[in-house]
């Protein structure tokens, strides 16, 4: 079939049922839906399919198998590994029109959603029903649930609440063969063999498409309080974390460098938390459920100052002030975006973070002293974001080429520390050449075997994770 015939056939497939989908071929739509937040691969999709039902997706997948048409899933397009990029004439399957909350069960504290439900939409629904969906990140206003699950997104609350997979009661998926599977049926206990949910969570659409998810909810946190500390040294991040965790259950523990703070302040809209400058900053969040908890927090702060770990600090006195302090961390990405940052999303076990970060920082600085390095991340769960800013007088192509060499050095260090080359954003295309730094040869062979079982014709997001 030629391109026109493929597009016409997909239009016919999506026209079925009570809720017809649509197909977009306008150049602006191809550009918008054919990419994610990465800027490395120019999008070149054949067409954009916007289905409305699981059955339409099933028909589309069967058509793709019969005609060797490659399909690429598209959610909120906020990923940083090019997992949702269609660069080779694929048909993009976008979930924007599958954005309904379908069912709510107050007794089970679960909510069934279509894959295109936006993270913030789910959070707001939970709040309206007196509950809480705790998986949260800066892109919550645009990221979609299907994409979150396909990359097992984490975010800022992992230290307390875990990753996206920890909140999935059930999934409905269309496999790469075109079968519809209803996985786990929302059961709390179901020990009947392999739990296929967890194969599709983190699979980046390479095994099939998640079309619905039943998500677990929990109680709302009580009086969330934020403490921002100026640290004397990077190693003090671990000293402070250990001290506070002995007394308090933290809901978040973030860090950022002095350079990151500088970009946020220069960007405007946010004020410095205190006058004292520090090389690194930590942001702690906890539930101030009683006067005793606040007393413990202040005593711990004073102890950290006395030990020389902390230079200064501020604690929120209201919900508004807590939100303003969070802006110091959450506005980093947008403040450095004009500098075309090259991003790496890496992790190690928490206790090894300081030495790991310092080693990477030293290697990059030694070889490229004109590169500005911005560090921030979820240090409480071992996840660091390395951002290298493009020098103003350097061409983007030259910059990305040099960063490929940086990648090799960074991931060699990751391998020595037995860490991950992708903590949150998946493998996609950008991390594909480096998978062996985190996964063994035997593991990769098993991953490819699983792919063959679910997608024998290779039509589901080909070229992602591995070739």
Image (spheres, rainbow, N blue to C red):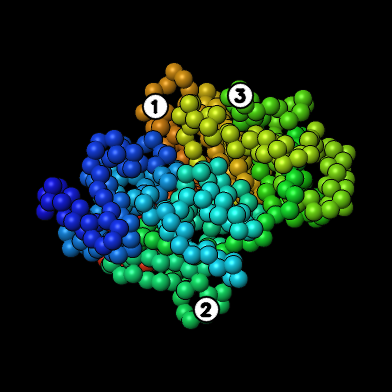
Marking on residue 232: none
Precedes in sequence: disc 1 or disc 3: 3
Precedes in sequence: disc 3 or disc 2: 2
Residue 123 rendering spot, x and y as whole percentages: 56, 52
- On the question of residue 412 being in view, the answer is no
Instruction: Give the residue at the far top of this rendering.
Output: 393
Residues at marks 3 and 2 touching, judged by CB atoms closer than 8 Å: no
Residue 134 rendering spot, x and y as whole percentages: 61, 55
The local crowd at label 2, few if under 14, some if 14 to 19, many if 20 or more residues have their Cα within 10 Å, is few
Judged from the image, the secondary structure of the residue bearing numbered disc 3 is loop
Q: Nearer the viewer, residue 63 or 55?
A: 55
Judged from the image, the secondary structure of the residue bearing numbered disc 1 is helix
Q: Which residue is depicted at the point 59% across and 62% down?
A: 217
**Mark 3, residue position:** 268
Work out how far the residue at label 1 is from the one at label 3, CA to CA, in angstroms: 26 Å
Q: Nearer the viewer, residue 93 or 359?
A: 93
On the picture, is 39 further left or further right than 184?
A: left
The local crowd at label 1, few if under 14, some if 14 to 19, many if 20 or more residues have their Cα within 10 Å, is some
**Mark 2, residue position:** 190
On the picture, is 428 further left or further right than 69?
A: right
Q: Nearer the viewer, residue 385 or 371?
A: 385
On the picture, is 457 further left or further right than 200?
A: left
Tell me the quadrant of the picture where the C terminus can be found: bottom left
Judged from the image, the secondary structure of the residue bearing numbered disc 2 is loop
Vertically, is 209 above or below 279? below
**Mark 1, residue position:** 396
């Amino acid at each position: 079939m030629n391109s026109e015939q493929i597009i016409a056939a997909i239009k016919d497939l999506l026209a079925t049922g009570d809720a017809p989908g649509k197909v977009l071929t306008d150049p602006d739509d191809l550009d918008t839906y054919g990419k994610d937040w990465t800027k490395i691969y120019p999008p070149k999709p054949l067409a954009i399919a916007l289905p409305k039902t699981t059955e339409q997706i099933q028909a589309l997948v069967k058509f793709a198998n019969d005609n060797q048409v490659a399909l690429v899933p598209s959610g909120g397009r906020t990923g940083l590994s090019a997992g949702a990029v269609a660069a080779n004439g694929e048909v993009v399957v976008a979930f924007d029109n599958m954005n309904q909350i379908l069912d709510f069960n107050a007794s089970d504290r679960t909510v069934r959603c279509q894959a295109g439900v936006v993270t913030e939409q789910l959070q707001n629904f939970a709040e309206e029903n007196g509950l809480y969906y705790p998986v949260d990140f800066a892109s919550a206003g645009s990221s979609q649930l299907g994409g979150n699950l396909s990359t097992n997104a984490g975010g800022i609350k992992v230290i307390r609440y875990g990753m996206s997979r920890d909140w999935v009661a059930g999934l409905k998926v269309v496999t790469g063969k075109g079968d519809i599977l209803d996985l786990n049926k929302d059961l709390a206990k179901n020990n009947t063999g392999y739990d296929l949910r967890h194969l599709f969570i983190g699979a980046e659409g390479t095994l099939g498409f998640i079309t619905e998810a039943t998500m677990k909810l929990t109680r709302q946190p009580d009086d969330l309080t934020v403490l921002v500390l100026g640290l004397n040294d990077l190693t003090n991040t671990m000293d402070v974390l250990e001290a506070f965790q002995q007394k308090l259950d933290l809901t978040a523990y973030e860090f950022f460098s002095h350079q990151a703070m500088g970009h946020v302040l220069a960007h405007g809209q946010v004020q410095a938390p205190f006058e004292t400058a520090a090389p690194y900053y930590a942001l702690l969040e906890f539930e101030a459920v009683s006067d005793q908890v606040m007393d413990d927090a202040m005593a711990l702060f004073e102890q950290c100052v006395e030990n020389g770990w902390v230079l200064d600090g501020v604690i929120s006195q209201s919900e508004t002030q807590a939100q303003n302090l969070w802006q110091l961390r959450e506005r980093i990405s947008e403040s450095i975006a004009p500098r075309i940052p090259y991003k790496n999303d890496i992790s190690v076990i928490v206790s090894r973070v300081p030495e790991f970060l310092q080693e990477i920082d030293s290697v990059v600085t030694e070889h490229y002293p004109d590169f500005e390095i911005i560090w921030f991340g979820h240090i409480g769960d071992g996840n660091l974001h390395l951002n290298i800013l493009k020098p103003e007088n350097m061409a983007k192509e030259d910059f990305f080429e040099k960063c490929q060499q940086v990648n090799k050095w960074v991931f060699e260090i990751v391998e020595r520390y037995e860490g991950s080359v992708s903590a949150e954003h998946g493998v996609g295309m950008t991390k594909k050449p480096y998978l062996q730094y985190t996964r063994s040869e035997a593991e990769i062979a098993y991953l490819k075997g699983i792919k063959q079982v679910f997608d024998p014709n290779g039509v589901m997001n080909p070229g992602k994770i591995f070739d």
